[in-house]
Image (cartoon, rainbow, N blue to C red):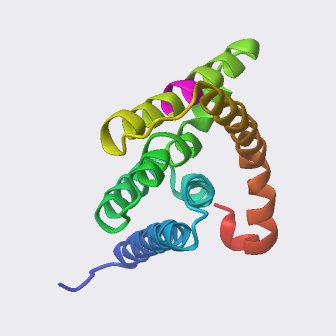
Amino acid sequence: MALSSTYERVICLKQSKRIAACGMMAALSVVIMLLGGVLGIGMYASPMLAGFCLLPIGKKYGAKNQWLVWAAVSLLCFMLIPEPEQNLMYLALFGLYPILYPYFGRLPGAWKWISKLLYFHAAAISVELLVMLVLVPEVMSAAMIVILLILGNAVFWMYDFLIPRSDLLFRRFLGRRFRQ
């Protein structure tokens, strides 16, 4: 099939760049998740780093492509990575949060923080309950659960703090290629 006009060639080139960028970021996310499982730092660190890979896609190509990359990475992780908690953390929390971050930013004042806290607690508690009760039934003391939730809040707020600042890093390292 020959492209008949310069306009069609330009559109085809832009779509090819978008598909390639999304595919590379999805592949990078899956590799980060795989390395997290192999190195033993995977439960929380690798889903967070893989979630950061969604930020340039959303910035350059929009939320629709971000959703597609998130879905592809989630599916591939469930097929390739044997750690269910790590996969669920990416699926429900750290992979989804960069996509939802702009929507939280639209809320006024205190509602923004309340909704972020509710989202984090709902996702973290449901993932941990699913893992502890269904997938890997282990007995954990109530004190340990409270400590993990407190530490999880601290990690989540750091993640929330780094998401808007990552834009500066992308601009610095990617320069003109990062701008739209």
Which residue does the image show at 49% across and 71% down from the upper left?
Answer: 21
**Residue 130 at what x, y percent from top left?**
37, 35
Q: Is 137 or 161 nearer to us in this picture?
A: 137
Residue at figure coordinates x 80%, y 50% from the top left: 165
Residues shaded magenta: 119-123
Q: Where does the image place residue 22, in percent across and percent down from the top left?
A: 45, 67
Question: Is 51 located above or below residue 140 in the figure?
Answer: below
Number of callouts: 0
**In the foreground, 18 or 12:** 18
The percent position of residue 168, horizontal first and vertical second, equals 81, 58
Instruction: In the rendered view, tell whether residue 83 sits above or below residue 32.
Output: above
Q: In the drawing, does residue 84 fall left or right of residue 140?
A: left
| Quarter the N terminus occupies | bottom left
In this rendered view, identify the residue nearer to me: 147 or 16. 147
Q: Is residue 97 above or below residue 106?
A: below
Outermost residue to the bottom: 2
- Work out which quarter of the rendered image holds the C terminus and state it: bottom right
Position in image of residue 62 (x %, y %): 51, 50
Question: Which residue is at 62% across, 36% downward?
Answer: 102
83 displayed left or right of 28: left
Magenta stretch secondary structure, dominant: helix
108 vs 60: above or below: above
Q: Quadrant of residue 132?
A: top left
Image point 53% across, 33% down: which residue? Answer: 124
Residue 37 lies in the magenta-colored region: no
Left/right placement of residue 149 relative to residue 128 reads right
